[in-house]
Image: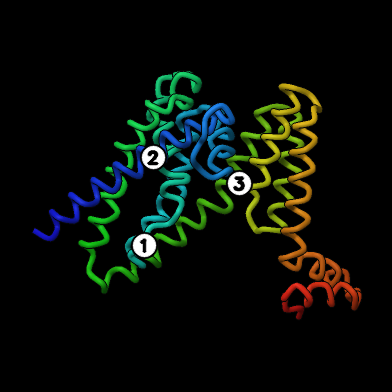
Amino acid sequence: MEFMIILIKSAIIGALVGVGAGAGAARMFHAPTVQGMGAFRTLGELNACAGDAASHFSFGLGFFFNAWASSVGAGAFTQDIDHRIIPNWAAAVLLRKGKKPEETLHDPKKMGIAGGIIGVIIVVFLNSTASAIPESLQAIAVKVLVPAANLLINPVMPVIFWLAALDAGKRSGIWGTIFGGLAHIIMGNAVPGVVLGILIGKGVDDGGWTKITKTLLTAVILLFALSAFFRGFDINLIKSFHLDVPTWLINIHEMLGQEVK
């Protein structure tokens, strides 16, 4: 009886989350005419898959194993379920047989329905397996699934997105390589940088160096600069050359509450 209650509640929650995540992600393609719902990275990652069903599915699959391990081992869902897995798998279902993204991925109604179905399947599966696995096996499951998920997220996924950037055109390939390399050095994962590089490259291809593309490039550079600073990358870079870190730079970091070693 308890297991059936878990299934029913999971189905209801999965449907609600799936409809919201699917329709919300689709509405982002129509902003600012309508209000979207989703993280900026969701839109960027959906665009990076370039309307290819296999790419959408494989991208979601990479985060699914990590979400599964978290559900089994910690009893909690990761944010990747509604930001990455549901939208991308819903897109993969709708884009099968070579259908156009404009008629599927950009349609809030179709994405909401597909997202609801995917959400039910995912949440029911995760909750049912988490409740069925004995505590003694949960630790083992985490030890197996987490390393597998980590390998998919890094380095497999960055390579896939980098290849997608190269395939998207010369500009996307160049900017994807530059920002992907910087993201890997600064953040430890190249995917955010490659996605931003694709957006900049495709933006320039479509409309040239307009005010929007220049603003986007400036914002991305500022984002990387701030991320590098607050991660202490500047200090580590100076130390890697076996140079003394300037006292004023250390004082700035400490003034902002950062511990400098």
Q: Which label's residue is closer to the chain start, 2 or 3?
A: 2
Query: Would residue 86 appear left or right of 244 to someone viewing this image?
Result: left
Query: Would residue 209 appear left or right of 2 to someone viewing this image?
Result: right
Q: Residues within 10 Å of mark 3 (few under 14, many from 20)?
A: many
Quadrant position of the N terminus in the picture: bottom left
Which three-letter amino acid code belongs to the residue tagged 1?
Ala
Q: Residue at x 39, y 40 (%)?
A: 20
Which three-letter amino acid code belongs to the residue tagged 2?
Gly
Which three-letter amino acid code belongs to the residue tagged 3?
Pro
Query: In the figure, 213 relative to 103: above or below?
Result: below
| Of marks 2 and 3, the one in the foreground | 2
Could you say whether the residue bearing mark 2 is in a helix, strand or loop?
helix
Furthest-left residue in this view: 1
Q: Which residue is mark 3?
A: 158
Q: How many marks?
A: 3
Q: How is the image coloured?
A: rainbow
Q: Residue at x 86, y 69 (%)?
A: 238
Q: Are marks 1 and 2 in contact (CB under 8 Å)?
A: no
Q: Position of residue 113 (x, y in %)?
A: 33, 31
Q: Position of residue 116 (x, y in %)?
A: 32, 37
Q: Which residue is mark 1?
A: 76
| Of marks 1 and 3, the one in the foreground | 1
| Cα distance between the residues tagged 2 and 3 | 28 Å
Q: Which residue is mark 2?
A: 20
Q: Residue at x 38, y 30 (%)?
A: 93
Q: Which label's residue is closer to the chain start, 1 or 2?
A: 2
Q: Position of residue 111 (x, y in %)?
A: 40, 30
Could you say whether the residue bearing mark 3 is in a helix, strand or loop?
helix
Front-lying residue, 15 or 199 = 15
| Cα distance between the residues tagged 1 and 2 | 20 Å
Q: Position of residue 34 (x, y in %)?
A: 52, 29
